[in-house]
Amino acid sequence: MNSLYNYLKIGEILVKQKNITPSDLNNALKMQEKTCGKKLGAILIESNHITENILLKALSDQLNIQAVDLDNYYFDPDAARLLSEATARKTCCMPLRIRDDRILVAMDDPLNIFHVEDVEAETGKKAEIVLACKSQIMNSIEKHMGRRSAEKAAEDFNKEVSLTADDGDECENIISINNAPVVRLIDSLINQAIQTGASDIHIEPFENSLRVRIRVDGDLQEILTPSKHIMSAIATRVKIIAGMDIAEKRLPQDGRIEMKIDDSVVDVRISVLPTVYGEKIAMRILDRNNFLKTKEELGFTQDNMEKFNSLLEVPNGIVLAAGPTGSGKTTTLYAALYELNKLNKNIITIEDPVEYKIEGINQVQVNTKAGLLFSTGLRSILRQDPNIIMVGEIRDEETAEIAVRAAITGHMVISTIHTNDAVSTIMRLRDMGVKPYLVAASLRGIVAQRLVKKICLNCREEYGASEAEKRLLEIKGSLILHRGRGCPKCYYTGYSGRTAIHEILKVDRVIRDAIQNEKSNDEIERLAEGAAMKTLKDNCRELVISGITSMEEYIQVVYKI
């Protein structure tokens, strides 16, 4: 390391390393004067002259302090327990390891002596400092200390409130429910789920235990096992914030809350279900920033994108998104609505529930208690002069019949349906009682889809495909595949995020004749593949070969279709 850097200011180092020009530095210094001493590095990052990593390297050279990549670092959980999450956030510090009477901590500003003193005072150990990016530190706090916050809140609640295992004990009065620990517990669970990218939170009571799990990338993982005695208070707290009846414990209830996390608005849809051991709580996390996608963000191949675009251009008929629960059908529908939302179109939806409110679209919420069902709502919508109708789900014969008749009378109808693939959707409509000639006349296309996990780019590695893998992929010769080793960034799963695979069946004249003549699924599938329809299996195979998903995910898709 060049000791010369020790005697230079950070701006001079950045110029010397040719990361910025002298002119950039002068402009940043002028800006610093106007902002009452805001840090130069922050100004240069905000103006897009440098990145966090460039600044980190320059600081490392200047201060002669090691810089670490927290995305690939092993965190000692015992170290994290010595520092509260509040102090970690305040000081922008992440504890890494304990070394006898010392604690190794990552900071973005080691020159802030007050922050160092705060860390040392709370941990009772001498701080050894390494440098890390501020964004990585804050992400690490969310990942590795969020769970501890929930555990601490549960422990505090247990200490402060004396609860019994007796379900009939009326311990969930307003005093106990509004105390800080149970509020912190619920808030920390929701925050942790959001920061982890989880789609759901499950709070499950059993005979002698309580389990909290979150669903990340389609898989459930346990994050907390608090005392069963606090379940009653948790349920009451959830009911209060979701606007439910706290006295009703015998019937299922549904509610909803809206939370502001940083700059994003998150909807949390809550369901409470009575079980033999107490009320089970399920929370669906609906992050508007992640949910509302354009059709370009849905993972379509170029060929499938062209087919999808052509389906959205039809003036009338039914377009269906098909797949099992949790396959991203609703996200696809909202992307379609976003594309179709024009000033000259009257778009009306009927949903259960309305996932997100979209400006310019008339959205109707199903209300079973009031008698507003998909079928009755759809009849009323037809009297509202719609151009496009979105039905949240076709569930029964009556809804299917009305949707079909709306389509053949000049309306465009888009909806979801629970089927395994595109071709089986046709049989499903027949099973609902819709006449084959009506299906043939109204159906314009079916988009069947699944979600597959993406290999973590941070720990992705190559390996030679085995003979068995090549046979499954129907490939001869040598083949390089990819998998994730597992790293802190992906919680050692080897996966990070999901993408969709699709098969799109366009109903042309040949397919329409086959439907009307009640041909079998196998025959219709042969006709569709002859017309260049790529199946879900084909789409997933392409993702495996291109290194986006793994062989493990391919097998899951192949054997579940």
Image (cartoon, grey):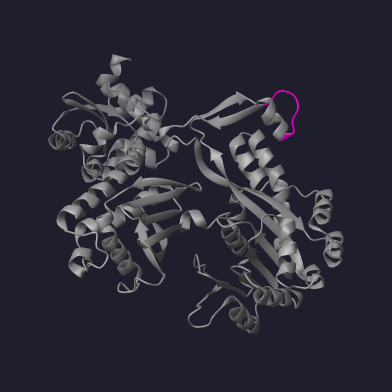
Q: Left or right of 6: which side holds 116?
A: left
Q: Quadrant of residue 284?
A: bottom left
For the point 28% across and 38% down, which residue is it?
39
Residue 391 in the magenta stretch? The answer is no
Could you tell whether 137 is left or right of 427 in the image?
left
Is residue 77 among the parts visible in the rendering? yes
The answer, for residue 49, to whether it is visible in the render is no
Q: Is residue 384 above or below residue 466?
A: below
Q: Is residue 262 left or right of residue 290?
A: left
The magenta stretch is: 473-479
Quarter of the view holding residue 185: bottom left
Q: Main secondary structure of the magenta part?
A: loop
Looking at the image, which residue is at 65% across and 60% down? Answer: 321
Q: Position of residue 475 (x, y in %)?
A: 74, 30
Which of the two residues, 241 or 518, is positioned nearer the viewer here?
518
Which percent across, then down, holds residue 92?
Answer: 26, 39
In the rendered view, does 201 fall on the left or right side of 495? left
Quarter of the image that includes the N terminus: top left
Quadrant of residue 335 in the image?
Answer: bottom right
Residue 164, position in %: x, y? 21, 60
Can you say whether 68 is above or below 399 in the image?
above
Where 511 falls versus 147 (above or below)? below
Comparing 57 with 105, the one in front is: 105
